Image (spheres, rainbow, N blue to C red):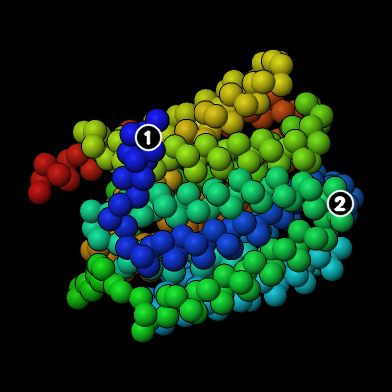
Amino acid sequence: MKKLYFNYLDTFRGLSKEVWWLALITLINRAGTMVIPFLSLYLTKSLGFTLENVGWIMTCFGVGSVAGSWLGGKLTDKIGYYKVMNISLFLTGILFVALQYVSTLLGFCIGIFLVMLVADTFRPAMFVALSAYSKPENKTRSVTLIRLAINLGFTAGPAVGGLIITSIGYQGLFWVDGVTCLLAVVLLMRVLHPKKAKVMDEVNVENPISIYKDKPFWIFFIAMFIFGFVFLQYFSTMPLYYRDVYHLTEFEIGLLFGLNGFIIFVLEMPLIKWLEKVNYSKPALMLVGLFLTALSFLVLIWSFPVGILVIGMLLMTIGEMIAFPFSNAFVIDRAKKGKQGEYMAFYSISFSAAHIFGHNSGMQLIDNFGFDNTWSLITILGFIGVLCLWILMRVTNKEKNIV
């Protein structure tokens, strides 16, 4: 047991203190984003919106995310990642608090668009900062540490969120979201100011290649869009499935999502360190991750006891543990020949675009065809994404042979 403990600690060695600070800032910020998993429940239960209404609100969520990711990439290349992260966190905190006072459909569409526009400028800036603070050989593990911070926050967030809803109502979630963003700003200013933070890997490309000419990246982009479309069902349609089909309470739903975060916190870093040693390419590992995520919907199609929800969550969790770090590392590698902010922006946009179509499509499909048929279609889409990643494997292998 002692050896296992020290082996686990060894997987974290070599990461810079700046990456650890960035992880802590992300943890504080993410711990407060407990509104998001409960958003579809809040909109239907507290505001009385229909599933169709919720679908359009989530589309605005996605449009704001796409715009914010694009804007974040542009601003990062112009004014630097530190200023973008600072401004984004501060304004997001203010907007989250204000969002609780919006109750009309049009108002909420505009409100959630503005929240995501500002909030998602943070993502490209954070990825560029992560790359700058990491040695080349540590980038995948650095990404994994950030994900651990995200999921540690996500472990506590939904569980605490369920308690907040039970005790003081949904409005409490918005206040917690806002305050934690502002706390993250304070910490960022104290520990990652440019005069204090040490850059490990600064990339300056004199003649950057346009991202629009990078054909393998666009195959990757399509695959990530599909992965995002499938994965994001867990944060919009899946909570409704848990409530309407298996009659879980908000607290039980929070615990189920908390299981996801806990497993990632305990197992992801050792898993990633082990996978880095095996002789598989990043596209091949992403393929495995997407396959397992698609499989998590396939197992739900038939009627099973409530335990099948845990199996589905485990499959999705292992899938995302593999797909996210290696997809991020893949795009960091390709960004070295172009503009970093632009590459990180489009990587974020692939998921933001999934927000536009994934939530709304999922809601409309459930409303018209029911949960089982929706899960069947989501599974098929996931396998199409697997095919895209197989094509990416072949293309990148040819690139290596040419070089």
Residue 168 in the image, given as x and y percentages of width and height: 87, 56
Please tell me which residue lies in front, 400 or 194. 194
- Location of the N terminus (image quadrant): top left
Residue 152 in the image, given as x and y percentages of width and height: 55, 49
The residue pinned by badge 1 equals 2
Residue shown at the point (83%, 61%) measured from the top left: 171
Q: Is residue 20 above or below residue 378?
A: below
Mark 1 crowdedness (10 Å alpha carbons): few <14, some 14-19, many ≥20: few
Disc on res. 167? 2
Please tell me which residue lies in front, 345 or 149. 149
Q: Quadrant of residue 243?
A: top right
Residue 212 at least partly seen: yes
Contact check, label 2 and label 1, Cβ < 8 Å: no
Viewer-nearest of discs 2 and 1: 1
Name the residue type under label 1: Lys
Please tell me which residue lies in front, 120 or 273. 273
Mark 2 crowdedness (10 Å alpha carbons): few <14, some 14-19, many ≥20: few
Residue shown at the point (80%, 60%) measured from the top left: 172
- CA gap, disc 2 and disc 1: 41 Å
Q: Position of 175 compared to 234: left or right?
A: right
Q: Quadrant of residue 118?
A: bottom right
Q: Is residue 188 above or below residue 212?
A: below
Q: Secondary structure at mark 1?
A: helix
Q: Position of 176 compared to 348: left or right?
A: right
Residue 283 in the image, given as x and y percentages of width and height: 31, 39
